[in-house]
Amino acid sequence: MGSGTGRVLRETVAWLLVAAGVAALVLPGPGLLMTCAGLTLLARDHAWAERWLAPVRRRALQGAAHSVATWPRIVLAATLALGIIGCGFLWAWSPPAPSWWPVPGIWWLPGGVAVAVTQIVAGMIGLGTIAYSCCRFRGQLDAPRLPTRQETAVEEAAA
């Protein structure tokens, strides 16, 4: 694979991660972490992405540390991720609409297998994120110490 092809592939994956991350800011999922991953890939070729990366990374890691600060948060997050995976398997199984369903059956579990797969993948990403956060941050008294925007600017100016 040539360098041009590799760059196109890397940028495509990066933009998909950024788009999914932005969507996951309002939908279930690790939005800041996906956005951070996409910006990390884009920063290899674009100075603007490198400028955005430090504050997004800082907020993503602080959010990850905050999410595993207590056992109830960990249990709740893991339960919700497993619930999303369970819903994905329900969608894949696609049972008929129950008798209590108030609207036409076509609106019962819409989207079929595509929705099922995305739910299962999202739940697995969620569990992976929880595991990563627990391994990296669990037991720390404070959020991770990352350079501030001013410290990052000073480092960039010195380079």
Image (cartoon, rainbow, N blue to C red):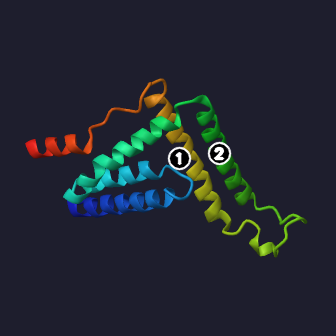
Q: Position of residue 151 (x, y in %)?
A: 20, 40
Q: Element under label 2? A: helix
Q: Which residue corresponds to the image point at 49% horizontal and 49% vertical from the top-left? A: 30
User: In the image, is 56 to the left or to the right of 81?
Assistant: left
Examine the image and state in which quarter residue 148 appears. Answer: top left
Which residue is the extreme one toward the front? 150
Residue 80, disc: 2
- Residue 159: tell me if it is visible: no
Q: Which of the pair 88/126 is nearer the observer?
A: 126
Residue 7 % position (x, y): 26, 60
Above or below residue 10? Residue 106 is below
* Nearer the camera: disc 1 or disc 2: 2
Q: Could you tell me residue 106's position as x and y percent?
A: 77, 74
Q: Which of the image's four quarters has the N terminus?
A: bottom left
Residue at 57% x, 52% y: name it: 121
Report crowding for label 1: few under 14, some 14 to 19, many 20 or more residues within 10 A (C-alpha). Answer: some
Labels 1 and 2: the sequence-earlier one: 2
Task: Measuring from the top left, give residue 12's x and y in whole percent.
Answer: 35, 63
Read off the residue under disc 1. Answer: 125
Distance of label 1 from label 2 (alpha carbons): 12 Å
Q: Is residue 79 visible?
A: yes
How packed mark 2 is, by other alpha carbons closer than 10 Å (few <14, some 14-19, many 20 or more), is some
Which disc number belongs to residue 56?
none
Q: Quadrant of residue 105?
A: bottom right
105 to the left or right of 5: right
Q: Residue at x 26, y 57 (%)?
A: 49
Could you tell me the amino acid type at mark 2?
Leu
Three-letter amino acid code of the residue under disc 1: Ile
Along the line of sight, the residue nearer the viewer: 89 or 6: 89
Residue under the point 73% across and 65% down: 109
